């Protein structure tokens, strides 16, 4: 039995490490950018995978280099929900960030707190007209525009072209009926009847309301009113959309049942475990990079009409910051969403470039030639509508997400579930309705 | 426990010395435990959310509101199931591990490492690893099921399986931690008494029930507290797995408080829920002291 | 289940670390090897059989307990294609270290690691002082309000900082400490658990030793430093280790109290790496992140596991 390392030695090691780190801290805390420039704090979330963090850092560094009088400090604040929580916490503590990329659909939460500034007066009509209207829609309230689109997306249908040709399917489905049929054809089972490959996957954990809104829009049903005081969760269109999802699993047996994780869908797709997935355009780059087969991108198939929600983050500027910061923030926003930067952000991430003129840039033209998939999302914008945005939107989102989970996992019948979500939402929204 | 009576004198001639010694920690406790506990009781009497335009006194309305809310009842029930479902099996396993390891074995170091290492894994890391195991299609669980010709399971996506799946993970992580407390406690169980009983022909279960477990009394008091507190405040796993879903099947009280505070901005409701959580913890402490602590005298 | 007739000491002991003056009946005398009496009438074979059963059970349980770690390590060495492939077993078919490089860079782990060490070291250093002082006060002084104050300290064990996130967050914002390492550390500068542990340990120290020191003209702090602490090192060490493990892994409060990666610990870094996988969960990358986070503490534990369990057993926690 060899002698164990004694605690005397251990405690000496711990003390040494502790002391040296305390010394180290003092130097870490010291570093700060120099004065006389306007220092802006920008919160940003990550909606998509790792490289985005470094891309954002690079973009902001470029801005700082070309604008000696402004220094933007980017703060990665987690996913959308935590980033929003951070900003809100900062607001209530009286120390908001200057500018932040936050969920476009959170608009009412910020205006209810009187926390964000209208931005339309800093932009010319012509400038505003260059942003896709479907993207600007989530920023509009009472004749003002409160947020400028930045990393915006919309769901599309990804499909595995190799599997399609192996199953002799010529093109992507364009209707719900066709989707169900193709998905059945693409589903494979082993000798004992266990499914080895599903036809389609519609992820349903977390913020399932988002893509589900697309299905509802396809039935010709709107989901909420423009002042954010009413939702239509129990409408016939919403019921039909939900039942379609359930049918994919339980009637057509072409989709795994239960609540399926958002992050798992692209992994399943690129791993060849499923032939089609509904997912955000924001995942396009990652999917193209990981897939070992030709990837097709199509509109979300239609029921009565094509339809899709927009999603993702817009840039907000916060109240209570000095005028010089507001000015600098607007400069920053204009730079970040300039055609060249919008194109760059789109190319490197897969988000849809937020301005029409970005598609006229050289870089985007070259990229679109090699990856025509990026144009699908742009073309779908014609049918796209604002993401579900209401007062107290996070809670409303939670209500509908919970009940959709309940319906999808078979806990309660569709109608009951949607009725519950409707009632819960009414209760909250009635506090805001005038 | 017949230590000599505590030094009851203050032999340094300064009557304020004990208070001086307590001052630093007391200040921290006051600022981050006692004051907030009182403060939150105060906040629970106000309606304060995005719609309210500032705080308005409402008395006990918030309590009525949450008790009336079926979702809150689900959350309470989940929390109870999670705490009891984790604490009881973890204690049983921890005690079994300790009894089996309370003697030299060839592979003792391996066993100790195997049972204890989960404690050293951050819950977010453990939950991530288990989420991968639970992943339908190519997670370890499905691969094993597939070997046996079974179908696919989606534990974290199924409202019936999600909470049990997270409980399994928590038991895995906590048993080894409780094991070391039991191991420490077993050192105070005199071997000669056990031997005497054994020579008298007592079977092991009898020895366990009559001698070992009663002598472990103080350890149980402690372990029960540790197990309850550690599970009641454990929501890290939700951040990286279910986020409380599907349909609140895994939503726990502290997670609900977090969402009410930071996502829904409903300070009044969040404060009210905090009062419920703290109240429940204090009741557990009191019950524990009353039921288990009677024979255990830490004091003079 | 098992009828062991031997009760050998828990572990081999390091005689240099033998504690003096632990309360009788406590874990004081692990160091002395007890005789291993054999029970009459039980044959060697039946004993071996029973031991064998226990060992088989233990081994099976140990393997089961190790599966998540081994599975994570296996995945962390694997390429993305194999993760979802049908035939992938335990041994990586295409072992690669690239996941670790990517996870390290994507996850910003170098910053998080430094932060974690600073935070944990800061907490432990201050806690060491506060719990020793408070433990000493409760162990060796009589004063008005002692019982009440001691109960309040015990209550802190039951009402942890995280349960009070809402008011504590507000306190931190009004102190303008949100998004600093102080916000993470401050609430933990006192510990009811540590105070309780040190009180128990100090009560085991024979008062005569303190009397002697006082006769020699020692001030109170000299008594604590030169009489009490050297004799209660196992308790302090056990507390330090539990505290290190707790704060190294602590996630919820640091997540809430900080925003920027320059202040966040490694557990938050790992969760953010997981949360940033929206366009396709790269399990091999995430598992590499898990392994990176788990490894430091695991290695320390592997080296010190004997000393750790020993000191725990002797700490008087019971």
Image (cartoon, coloured by chain):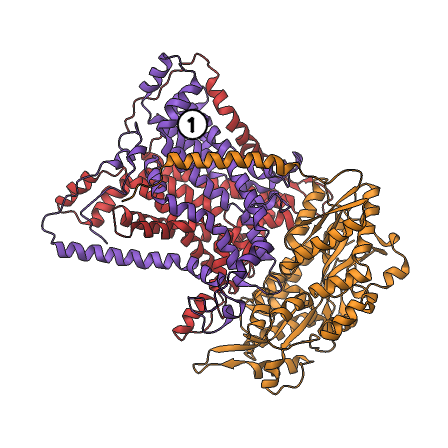
Instruction: Decide if residue C160 is on the left or right side of residue A355.
Output: left
Q: Which chain is red?
A: B
Residue found farthest to the right: A125
Horizontal side of A170 relative to C268 (left or right) equals right
Image coords of residue B34 (percent x, y): 54, 32
Q: Which chain contains the residue that carries disc 1? A: C
Visible residue check, residue B299: no
Which residue in the rendered view is the most extreme toward the left?
Answer: C41
Viewer-closest of A227 and C127: C127
What percent of the width, then of the height, locates residue C53? Answer: 23, 58
Residue on which the image places disc 1: C135
Query: Is residue B211 placed above or below C50 in the rendered structure?
Result: above
Please give the name of the residue rendered at 59% of the width and 51% of the height, measured from the top-left corner: C108
Residue in the picture at 26% in, 36% down? C31
Residue count near mark 1 (Cα–Cα under 10 Å), binned few <14, some 14–19, many ≥20: many
Secondary structure beneath label 1: helix
Using residue A65 as the reference point, say whether residue B76 is left or right of it: left
Q: Where on the picture, by quarter, is residue A128?
A: bottom right
Is residue C67 something one can see in this rendering? Answer: yes
Total labels drawn: 1
Write down the colour of chain C.
Answer: purple
Residue toward you, A121 or B68:
A121
- For chain A, what colour was chosen? orange
């Amino acid at each position: 039995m060899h002698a164990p390392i004694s605690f005397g030695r251990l405690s000496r090691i711990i003390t040494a490490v502790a002391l040296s780190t305390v010394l180290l801290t003092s130097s870490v805390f010291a570093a700060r950018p120099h004065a006389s420039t306007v220092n802006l704090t920008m919160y940003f979330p990550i909606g998509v995978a790792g490289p985005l963090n470094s891309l954002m850092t690079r973009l902001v560094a470029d801005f700082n280099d070309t604008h000696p009088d402004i220094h933007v400090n980017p703060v990665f604040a987690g996913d959308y929900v935590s980033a929003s929580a951070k900003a809100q916490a900062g607001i209530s503590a009286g120390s908001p960030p200057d500018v932040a990329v936050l969920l476009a659909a959170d608009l009412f939460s910020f205006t209810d707190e009187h926390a964000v500034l209208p931005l339309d007066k800093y932009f010319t009509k012509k400038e505003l007209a260059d942003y896709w209207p479907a993207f600007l829609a989530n920023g509009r309230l009472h004749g003002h525009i409160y947020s400028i689109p930045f990393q915006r997306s919309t769901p599309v249908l990804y499909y595995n072209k190799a599997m399609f040709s192996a199953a002799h399917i010529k093109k992507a489905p364009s209707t719900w009926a066709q989707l169900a049929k193709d998905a059945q054809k693409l589903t494979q089972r082993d000798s004992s009847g266990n499914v080895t490959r599903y036809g389609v996957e519609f992820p349903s954990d977390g913020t399932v309301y988002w893509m589900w809104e697309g299905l509802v829009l396809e039935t010709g049903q709107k989901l909420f009113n423009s002042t954010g005081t009413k939702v239509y969760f129990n409408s016939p269109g919403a019921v039909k959309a939900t039942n379609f999802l359930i049918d994919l699993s339980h009637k057509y047996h072409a989709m795994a049942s239960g609540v399926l994780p958002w992050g798992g869908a692209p992994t399943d797709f690129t791993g060849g475990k499923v032939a089609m997935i509904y997912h955000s355009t924001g995942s396009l780059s990652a999917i193209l990079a990981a897939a070992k087969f030709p990837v097709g991108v199509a509109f979300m198939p239609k029921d009565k009409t094509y339809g899709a929600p927009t999603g993702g983050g817009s840039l907000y500027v916060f109240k209570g910051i000095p005028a010089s910061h507001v000015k600098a923030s607007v400069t920053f926003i204009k730079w970040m969403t300039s055609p060249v930067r919008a194109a760059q952000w789109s190319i490197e991430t897969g988000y849809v470039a937020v301005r029409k003129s970005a598609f006229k840039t050289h870089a985007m033209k070259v990229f679109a030639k090699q990856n025509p998939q990026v144009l699908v999302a742009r073309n779908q914008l014609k049918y796209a509508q604002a993401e579900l945005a209401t007062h107290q939107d996070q809670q409303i989102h939670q209500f509908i997400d919970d009940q959709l989970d309940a319906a999808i996992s078979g806990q309660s019948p569709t109608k009951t579930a949607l009725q519950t979500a409707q009632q819960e939402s009414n209760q909250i929204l009635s506090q805001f309705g005038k | 426990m017949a230590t000599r009576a505590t030094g009851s004198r203050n032999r340094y001639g300064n009557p304020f010395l004990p208070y001086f010694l307590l001052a630093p920690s007391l200040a921290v406790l006051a600022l981050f435990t006692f004051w907030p506990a009182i403060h939150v009781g105060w906040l629970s009497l106000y309606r304060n959310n995005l719609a309210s335009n500032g705080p308005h006194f409402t008395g006990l309305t918030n309590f009525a509101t949450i008790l009336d809310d079926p979702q809150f009842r689900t959350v309470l029930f989940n929390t109870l199931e999670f705490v009891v479902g984790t604490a009881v099996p973890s204690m049983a396993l921890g005690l079994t591990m300790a009894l089996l390891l309370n003697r030299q074995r060839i592979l003792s170091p391996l066993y100790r490492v195997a049972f204890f290492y989960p404690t050293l894994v951050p819950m977010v890391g453990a939950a991530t690893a288990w989420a991968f195991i639970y992943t339908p299609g190519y997670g370890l669980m499905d691969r094993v099921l597939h070997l046996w010709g079974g179908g696919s399971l989606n534990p974290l996506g199924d409202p019936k399986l999600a909470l049990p799946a997270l409980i399994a993970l928590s038991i895995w992580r906590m048993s080894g931690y409780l094991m070391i407390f039991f191991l420490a406690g077993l050192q105070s169980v005199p071997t000669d008494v056990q031997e005497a009983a054994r020579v008298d022909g007592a079977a092991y279960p009898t020895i366990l029930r009559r001698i070992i477990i009663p002598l472990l009394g103080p350890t149980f008091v402690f372990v029960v507290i540790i197990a309850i507190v550690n599970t009641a405040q454990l929501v890290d796993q939700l951040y990286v797995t279910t986020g409380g879903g599907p349909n609140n099947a895994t939503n726990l009280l502290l997670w609900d408080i977090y969402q009410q505070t930071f996502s829904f901005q409903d300070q009044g409701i969040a404060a009210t829920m905090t009062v419920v959580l703290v109240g429940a913890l204090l009741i557990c402490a009191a019950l524990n002291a009353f039921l288990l602590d009677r024979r255990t005298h830490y004091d003079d | 289940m098992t009828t062991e007739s031997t009760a050998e000491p828990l572990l081999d002991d390091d005689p240099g670390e033998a504690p003096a003056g632990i309360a009788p009946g406590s874990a004081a005398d692990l160091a002395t090897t007890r005789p291993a009496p054999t029970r009459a009438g039980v044959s060697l074979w039946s004993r071996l059989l029973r031991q064998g059963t226990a060992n088989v059970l233990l081994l099976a349980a140990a393997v089961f307990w190790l599966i998540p770690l081994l599975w994570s390590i296996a995945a962390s060495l694997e390429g993305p294609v194999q993760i979802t492939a049908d035939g992938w077993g335990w041994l990586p078919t295409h072992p690669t270290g690239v996941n670790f490089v990517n996870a390290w860079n994507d996850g910003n782990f170098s910053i998080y690691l430094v932060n974690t060490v600073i935070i944990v070291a800061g907490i432990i250093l201050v806690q060491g002082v506060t719990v020793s002082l408070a433990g000493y006060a409760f162990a060796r002084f009589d004063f008005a309000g002692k019982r009440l104050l001691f109960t309040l300290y015990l209550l802190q064990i039951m009402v942890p900082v995280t349960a009070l996130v809402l008011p504590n967050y507000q306190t931190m914002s009004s102190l303008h400490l949100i998004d600093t390492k102080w916000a993470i550390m401050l609430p933990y500068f006192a510990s009811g658990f540590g105070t309780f542990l040190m009180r128990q340990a100090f009560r085991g120290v024979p008062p005569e030793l303190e009397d002697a020191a006082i006769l020699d003209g020692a001030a109170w702090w000299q008594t604590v430093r030169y009489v009490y602490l050297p004799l209660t090192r196992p308790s302090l060490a056990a507390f330090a280790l539990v505290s290190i493990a707790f704060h190294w892994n602590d996630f919820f409060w640091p997540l809430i109290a900080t925003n920027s990666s320059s202040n966040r610990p490694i557990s938050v870094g790992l969760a953010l790496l997981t949360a940033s996988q929206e366009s396709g969960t790269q399990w091999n990358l995430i598992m590499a992140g898990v392994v990176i986070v788990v490894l430091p503490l695991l290695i320390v534990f592997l080296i010190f596991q004997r000393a750790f369990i020993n000191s725990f057993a002797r700490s008087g926690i019971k």
